[in-house]
Amino acid sequence: MSLYPSPAAHTVADYERAATERMSDDALSYIGGGAGNEITLRDNEAAWRRLALRPRALGAPAGAGTGVELLGVRRPHPVLIAPTAFARLTHPDGELGVARAAAATSTIMCLSTFASVSAAALAADVPDATRWFQLYVLADRGATRELVSAVAAHGYEALVVTVDRPVLGIRERELRAVVREAEALGHDRPIDTSAVIDPQLRWSDIEQLVADSPLPVLIKGVLTAEDAHLAAEHGAAGVIVSNHGGRQLDTVLAGADALPEVVDAVGDRLDVLVDGGIRRGTDVVKALALGARAVLIGRPTLWGLAVDGSAGVQRVLEILLAELENALTLVGAPRITDLDRSFLTAAPWAGSAR
Ligand SMILES: Cc1cc2nc3c(=O)[nH]c(=O)nc-3n(C[C@H](O)[C@H](O)[C@H](O)COP(=O)(O)O)c2cc1C
C-alpha cells in the first residue's frame, strides 16, 4: 500500500479536523472533552512537543523494523488501541470496526468494559484481532469474576485494570451532552457507569485479582513512582502511565512528563506503557526513548472511526506506523531497543509557539 493513498488525509490531525466537521456536538463533547479547565488534556499533546530529538547518523539500516516484546510476546509494533467506551456513538461500525482495523494492522486492541459490543461478540466477529480487555472492577465482585473468566475464555490476552476512575472526573462539556448520548445508544436513561464501578478498590483487591486472573494484569492510570512500586508489589505484569486522556483530574502531569519517574521506578521489573496525546510517529519514538515498551492511542482511533468507519481507523493506524518507521530510521535507531534518553533533549522551543 502506498504511503499516502488518500490525498485528503495525511496525518492524524487531518482526521481530527475531518471528524470535527462530521460529528454531532454531543459526540464531539464526549470524545474531545476533558476534566476541569482541560489543562492536562491540552498538555498531553504539548508535552511530547517539548522534547526534541537528537538523531544519530549512519546508524540505522532503513526499514529495520518496529518489532517489540510486550508481556514476553513478540509483537510487530508498539502501538496499541486504548480502551474507549461506547464506540458506536462515533460510528455504527463501533468496536467491531475498530477490531477489524486492528486485525488488518496487527495492532492490539484493548476493549473497554463499557464497550457497545460484548467481549464475546467481538471475539466471535473478529477472531483475528489480538485483544486485551480493560476492566473496571465492579462493586459486584461475583460479576467481576465472571467477566474475567469470560474474557479469558474468549481469547483476550491481558487484563488492563483502570484505577484512575473511582469517581468520574468533572467533564463539563460531557455533562451537557450526557442525556442525548444515552439516546444515541438506544437507552432511555443516561448510562450511570459510576453506579457499577467500585469506588472502594484497594491495592489488596488488585493482589486478589492478580491471584485469581488467568491473564496477566496491567494497571492503567499510574502517574507516580509510588503507585508503580505498589503495582509491582501487588503482582502486576505492567503499568500504563495515563491520565485517562485528561478526562479525570485536571492539572495532573501529562503522560510524557510522568513516564520517566515510572520507568525509573519499575522499568526493570514491569512493562511500562504510556498514553495521552500521541499523534505522531515522533511522539511514539520519544515515548520509547523515555523507556516505554509501547504506547496506546485513544482519540485518534475514534477520529478515524468517525470519518470513515473501520477503514478510517485502519488508515489512522497506517499513518502512525508509517511515521514511526520513518522516524526510527531518521533518528538512527536500528532497533527500538537501541532507543534511550540520549536520543532526547529538552526542546529549545518549549514554552514558545508550537
Ligand atoms: C471517548 C473516550 C472514552 C474512554 N473510555 C475509557 C474507558 O472506558 N476505559 C478506560 O480505561 N479509559 C478510557 N478512556 C481513556 C483512554 O483509554 C486513554 O487513556 C486516552 O484516551 C489516551 O489519550 P488520547 O485520547 O490523547 O490518545 C477513554 C477516552 C476517551 C477519549
Image (cartoon, rainbow, N blue to C red):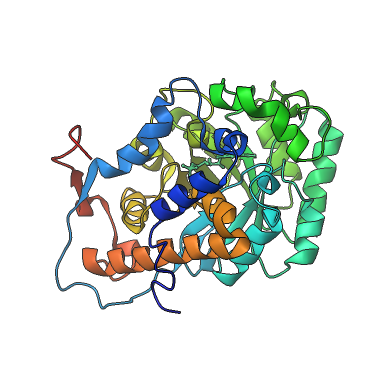
* Nearest to the observer: residue 231 or residue 51: 51
Q: Position of residue 35 (x, y in %)?
A: 51, 24
Q: Position of residue 88 (x, y in %)?
A: 70, 48
The residue located at (43%, 32%) in the rendering is 41
Figure check: 267 above or below 80? above
166 left or right of 60?
right
Query: Can you tell me which quadrant of the image ligand 1 is in?
Result: top right
Left or right: where does residue 224 sit relative to residue 112? Answer: left
Position of residue 185 measured from the top left corner of the image (x, y, whole percent): 76, 40
**Image mark count:** 0
Residue at (62% x, 59% y) in the render: 309
In this view, 283 is above or below 188: below
Q: Is residue 262 left or right of residue 100?
A: left
Residue drawn at (54%, 69%) of the image: 105
Image quarter hosting the C terminus: top left
**Side (left or right) of 327 relative to 20:** left
The answer to whether residue 72 is visible is: no
Q: Quadrant of residue 205?
A: top right
Residue 58 found in image quarter: bottom left
Query: Is residue 62 in view?
Result: yes
Give the vertical position of 28 relative to 168 (above or below): below
To which quarter of the image does residue 203 belong?
top right
Q: Residue at x 72, y 40 (%)?
A: 114
Question: Which quarter shows the N terminus?
Answer: bottom left
Where in the figure is residue 158, as x and y percent of width and height?
65, 53
Looking at this view, is 88 or 318 the one in front? 88
